[in-house]
Each structure stands twice: as structure tokens, then as C-alpha cells.
Image (cartoon, grey):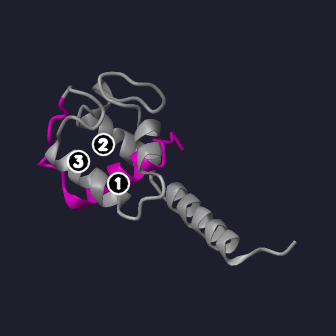
């Protein structure tokens, strides 16, 4: 089986994305989301008040700056991207907490 350059790049990208998704400490991220009331409005696989985490992950799939965008959205809040209901800001979260939550969301909010 001969692969062209595009196929090699896509395969390598898939491996990197998958490796990053498995590196997320899901238990710590879920506990942090629970502690900060994220789970009152979001669920992994269905829309509640806000979008599901799987929908957020799908919206940002393939974007090189996805984590930075999600970190910024969590920190500053906002509305309009998924509907009119605003998401409250989380300005008191530390950078490492924001990155953990963003990585977890972009991985589809895995339980394990």
C-alpha cells in the first residue's frame, strides 16, 4: 500500500490528535468542570442550556488554534456562537485549569 504525501500528513495528524486526547486527565477535568458549575449547562453528548462538549469539539476539529479559542471562551464567557444564552466567564480559573478544561472539551469530554 503506497501512501501519498497528503495521506501521510492526515495519518500523522490523526495520531497526534488522538495522542493528545488520551493525555487529558479526564477525572481531574470532570471534577474541575463540576466544581465550577460547567456541568449545570453542558453535557458530553447532548445539548442542555449550552452545547454538548462533543458539538464544541466537532466545531473546532482541525483548527490549529482550537485550544486557545476554547480557553479564551471559558475565561471570558460570551454568547452567540451556539445561541443567545450567554456563558458566564470563569476569570478565576488558573491557566493550567483553563487548558485542562479546554483539552478535555476538545477531546469530547471523555470519562476515562
Which residue range is magenta in the image? 86-112
Provide the residue designation for mark 1: 100
Q: Taking the image as drawn, is residue 67 in sight?
A: yes
**Mark in front: 3 vs 2:** 3
* Residue 88, disc: none
- Left or right, 3 with reference to 33: right
How much space separates mark 3 and mark 1, taking CA atoms?
A: 14 Å
Quarter holding the C terminus?
top right
Find residue 99 and report its horizontal and vertical position in percent: 31, 57
Sequence-wise, the earlier of marks 3 and 1 is 3
How much space separates mark 3 and mark 2, taking CA atoms?
A: 16 Å
The residue that appears at 22% across and 60% down in the rendered structure is 95
Find residue 107 and report its horizontal and vertical position in percent: 48, 49
* Outermost residue toward the top in this view: 48
* Residue 32, disc: 2
Image quadrant where residue 68 sits: bottom left
Find residue 24 and report its horizontal and vertical position in percent: 46, 55
Provide the residue designation for mark 3: 73
The residue that appears at 83% across and 75% down in the rendered structure is 2
Of 70 and 4, nearer the camera is 4
Q: Is residue 50 above or below residue 29?
A: above
Image quadrant where residue 15 sits: bottom right
How much space separates mark 1 and mark 2, taking CA atoms?
A: 9 Å
Of 29 and 6, nearer the camera is 6
Q: Is residue 37 above or below residue 18?
A: above
The residue that appears at 48% across and 30% down in the rendered structure is 45
Amino acid at each position: 500500500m503506497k501512501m501519498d504525501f497528503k495521506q501521510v500528513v492526515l495519518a500523522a495528524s490523526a495520531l497526534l490528535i488522538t495522542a493528545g486526547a488520551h493525555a487529558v486527565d479526564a477525572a481531574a477535568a470532570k471534577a474541575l468542570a463540576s466544581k465550577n458549575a460547567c456541568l449545570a449547562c453542558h453535557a458530553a453528548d447532548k445539548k442542555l442550556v449550552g452545547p454538548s462538549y462533543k458539538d464544541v469539539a466537532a466545531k473546532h476539529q482541525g483548527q490549529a488554534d482550537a485550544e486557545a479559542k476554547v480557553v479564551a471562551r471559558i475565561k471570558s464567557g460570551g454568547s452567540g456562537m451556539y445561541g443567545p444564552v450567554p456563558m458566564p466567564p470563569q476569570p478565576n480559573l488558573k491557566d493550567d485549569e483553563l487548558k485542562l478544561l479546554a483539552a478535555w472539551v476538545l477531546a469530547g469530554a471523555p470519562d476515562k
